[in-house]
Image (cartoon, coloured by chain):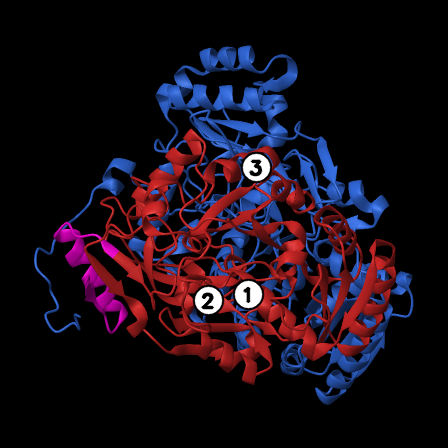
Chain colours: A blue, B red
Amino acid sequence: MSVRMPEADSAVLARRDKIVAALRTMVPGEGVIASEREMRPFESDGLTAYRQLPMVVVLPETTQQVAQVLRYCHDEGIKVVPRGAGTSLSGGALPLADGVLLGMAKFNRIREIDFDNRVAVVEPGVTNLAVSNAVAHAGFYYAPDPSSQIACTIGGNIAENSGGVHCLKYGMTTNNVLGCEIVLITGEVLRIGGRHLDSEGYDLLGLVTGSEGLLGVVTEVTVRILKKPETARAVLIGFPSNEDAGECVSAIIGAGIIPGGMEMMDKPAIHAVEEFVHAGYPLDVEALLIVEVDGPRAEADDLIERIEIIASKCHAVSVQASTSEQQRLLFWAGRKAAFPAVGRISPDYYCVDPTIPRNKLPLVLKRMREMSEKYGLRCANVFHAGDGNLHPLILYDANKPGELEKTEAFGAEIMKLCVEVGGVLTGEHGVGVEKRDLMPLMFSEIDFNAQQRVKCAFDAKGLLNPGKMFPSLHRCAELGRLHISAGKLPFPDIPRF
Amino acid sequence: MTDTLKPRDAKEAEEAVRWALGNDKALEVAGQGTKRAVGRPSQTDLTLDLSGLTGVALYEPQELVLSARAGTPLAEIEKLLDENGQQLAFEPMDYGPLLGGQPGQGTIGGAIAANLSGPRRIKAGAARDHFLGVTAVTGRAETVKSGGRVVKNVTGYDLCKLIAGSWGTLAAMTDVTVKVLPKAETEATVLVEGLDDARACAAMAAAMGSACDVSGAAHLPDHVASYFDGLPNAEAATALRLEGFAPSVKHRKEALAALMKPFGRVALLEDKDSRALWVSVRQVKPFAAAAARPRPLWRISTAPARGHEIAAAITPAAQMVYDWAGGLLWVAMPFSDEPGAAAIRAAVKSVGGHAMLVRAPAGVRASVDVFEPQEASLRALSKRVKESFDPKGVLNPGRMWAGA
């Protein structure tokens, strides 16, 4: 592990037996797990390169239990790492040696479905896909669809502000949640939002969404549900170069079309996927686009026609529109299996997810190829082309000494480049521990302090998920200090009226 | 008259706040000041006038992003986007006429600070949903940035969300980046005429629950219908807007008209009349402050299917317009000095949501809560958040809540 976590508090570890006993009084039965063997499955999340056994695992079932556990940890100065399904790709749910791992999996009920107001009220441990499944009988669905949707939970989606392939048109988690119940580290239970569209005061729901478990523990979520479009059609477009594919994406958006999904793959990804899924992808192209449009049949057919014309102007060498639902799903099956397909051709892979201004795509892909040669590691690219969110998959073998370190250096160099060209470190996977130490590429000390002061407003002792997101931690008292310097108007020439 | 500081660049804005901080002065943070009558009356010593920070710094239509200085006139940005077939999809509503000013004024920073949105809120979201990046001066006189210039980003806390809708109480924005989107090729409106409020909310719920992709759903009761442009008759109208490519709008118009038939008499508005109608909905035209003593005006956000229940619980002498499929109520109370806060707050409490007194004489706004009062722990948390940005209360102190 190359990322340093906050030093374990030996005084807390010394009290472990007492702490476990106290937690057992709050969450009875199998809700507290303390044996090393049973805690082993919790030692890492989706970023498996990092592992750490927690001090103890607690699996509460009620808001009251969550409040009690958090209040206890607050009073006793014990760190807490909240976790949904543990599918984070950035180590956001990585345990701490001296911390409670608070698993929310037992909060797995759908509390209410309200079609008249087009919302579902769910517990945070409900999986993303289960929300859509619960409303499917009435033709509704929940729009954000991260690739892990079969496993990842709504609570985790809130923590990470999860996206998916449809978010250019339908938004990320933050655009699709209306309310939540959240427990602060002090044990206070707050209700934020409801079934209405906007906030009565500060947009705390917007702040909590994407806060990576550092501000509170969500115990109920109200999400918006949408009626499914009547139909969806996809078109596969092959290009002789990445530049042409990038040009085509811009031209489609320039024509006023916001597709439901627009995904791009480079040659190594196309080959890996086609060998695995046999989706019918062309193998003689450098880049492949899947463009999906949805709406009434008349709209889908009209847009497919417009897109085909645009594609041919952008030097497309193959254009194939889906003619059946089965075929559309097959087109997607390839893209959705990109990670396992790459997993087949390499013992391990590592994925980062920076977003770049789309017009920098050819440059970034070219530089990535050069890096690939420099590090001697293969790299396959799949990405959300509409919003410029890259997913380079670096292929490596963890059993070869030094190769993980080399891979991480490669990933870091990609992210650095992306920030240099005007992009950001992460588009949807989160900072977690993985990108924590790269944050200074984007933020100054002053920026960090402003963010950490917000953290202090929620968690003054810094007990919730420490070691994630921020490269260095400061005490709230120190951050709160105000430095007043100027006693006179320092700009006498400023216009005054 | 209040003294004004008008910085010419972001650095001077930071210096102005530093000076205020060092001299125990409170600043009214303003763009063009078009919405200064919203909120609790100003308790500030000087105005920090950001309308001198103007200009679009970056506009890349195919990247769907635009960056501008916060004081750039909204009209200038909307014109530039329009010339490129794009728009601010959140359709910022115009408080000007409601507050006795001209339409078409205001800055991009002001639109974000008030988290403006319009009828398209139900489909496209509000300013907060399109606010990608910010540079702002906090009450600590520190220039802070958050977000970025790409449309998808989860790096660090989303401070943009916090600043949108904070009415200048957390930080003075100097530069903003927003997501922009293509304008629809065409639009049309399906009207259902003669519905009472409860039936109208049911019709709007049915329309929103269909696959017709409705991008505006408003109910304009009898007593206000004549104020709206584009309507064929001066009677209650439930309006459902469809936008998109022509073949799609044509198809959905037919499907939606068929779906609405059981609710009442259906009429159709084509492109031009439809646009005129929705501009007047966006301006809440019936409640423009034309009179010398305009009626107090409330803005209520609630669960859409229950909007009519709130309306029914308020005095019959109140006038109202429903937007957001029933989830947004504009309520004008009958007497200029009597906002009827108790009745409004009780009605909202029974259904859920919140109410804001957007227009009332300053004396009234000083004596009743303008923003919805929050439950104790939430209020305490909001106060801590305010203090984290602005510990000494330099920026718009007391505008949202007394003592915060």
Magenta stretch: give its range: B1-27
Q: Amino acid at mark 1?
A: Lys
Quarter placement of the N terminus of chain B: bottom left
B122 relative to B74, above or below: above
The x, y position of residue A263, in whole percent, is 69, 67
Report the disc number at residue B285.
1
Q: Is residue B14 magenta?
A: yes
Callout 1: helix, strand or loop?
A: helix
Is B140 rendered above or below residue A83? below
Residue B11 against residue A302 in the figure, above or below: above
Q: CA distance from mark 1 to mark 2?
A: 8 Å
Q: Residue at x 35, y 70 (%)?
A: B71
Contact between marks 3 and 1 (CB within 8 A): the answer is: no
- x, y percentage for residue A73? 43, 22
The earlier-in-sequence mark between 3 and 2 is 2
Residue at 19% x, 45% y is A482
Residue A59 picture location, percent across and down: 60, 24
- Residue A456 figure quarter: top left
Q: Which residue is mark 2?
A: B97
Quadrant including the C terminus of chain B: top left
